[in-house]
Image: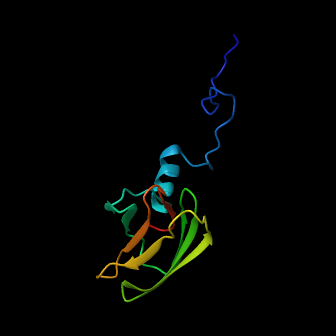
């Protein structure tokens, strides 16, 4: 009698699953904590406004826009942001430069940029 056993750890494409790798759900959960693709809270005069709520921590948030790149540097103390700086990495001359400010409670950021820049933020959210 010849008994065969099906290897349940082999995928349909032939690679072998290793338990050390993340599942799709685990990868999605990690990306959702680190990558933010927000919808604008308002748009007027060719400028879109986004309100984002990063973790209150000393951190840098990388912002990838359609034609420009930025880093938002944040400082915090006592459960609120106490410092911010917008560092422009690339500058497309035909695009209005972005601005950043804090909300009045200092727990979120307001990011303003040209309407079609569609920013993606990478940080801790």
Furthest residue in direction top, as rendered: 1
- As displayed, is residue 66 above or below residue 111? above
Q: Quadrant of residue 43?
A: bottom left
Q: Quadrant of residue 13?
A: top right
Quadrant of the frame with the C terminus: bottom left
Report x, y in % for residue 121: 49, 63
> Number of callouts in the render?
0
Q: Is residue 48 left or right of residue 9?
A: left
91 vs 37, nearest the viewer: 91
Residue plotted at (58% across, 73% down)? 88
- As displayed, is residue 104 above or below residue 61? below
119 vs 31, nearest the viewer: 119
- As displayed, is residue 10 above or below residue 30? above
Q: Quadrant of residue 47?
A: bottom left
Report x, y in % for residue 52: 38, 67
57 vs 97, nearest the viewer: 97
Quadrant of the frame with the N terminus: top right
Report x, y in % for residue 118: 47, 56
Q: How is the image coloured?
A: rainbow
Residue plotted at (45% across, 56% down)? 32
Residue plotted at (48% across, 68% down)? 124
Residue plotted at (34% across, 82% down)? 106
- As displayed, is residue 110 above or below residue 84? above
Report x, y in % for residue 123: 51, 67
Q: Is residue 83 left or right of residue 88?
A: left
């Amino acid at each position: 009698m010849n008994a065969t056993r099906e290897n349940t750890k082999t995928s349909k494409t032939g690679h072998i699953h290793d338990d050390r790798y993340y599942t799709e759900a685990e990868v999605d959960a990690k990306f959702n904590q680190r990558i933010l693709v927000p919808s604008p809270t308002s748009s007027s005069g060719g400028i879109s406004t986004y309100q984002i709520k990063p973790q209150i921590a000393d951190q840098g948030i990388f912002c990838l826009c359609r034609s420009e790149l930025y880093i938002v540097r944040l400082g915090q103390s006592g459960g609120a942001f106490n410092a911010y700086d917008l560092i422009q990495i690339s500058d497309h001359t035909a695009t209005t430069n972005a601005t950043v400010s804090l909300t009045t409670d200092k727990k979120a950021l307001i990011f303003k940029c040209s309407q079609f820049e569609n920013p993606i933020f990478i940080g801790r959210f």
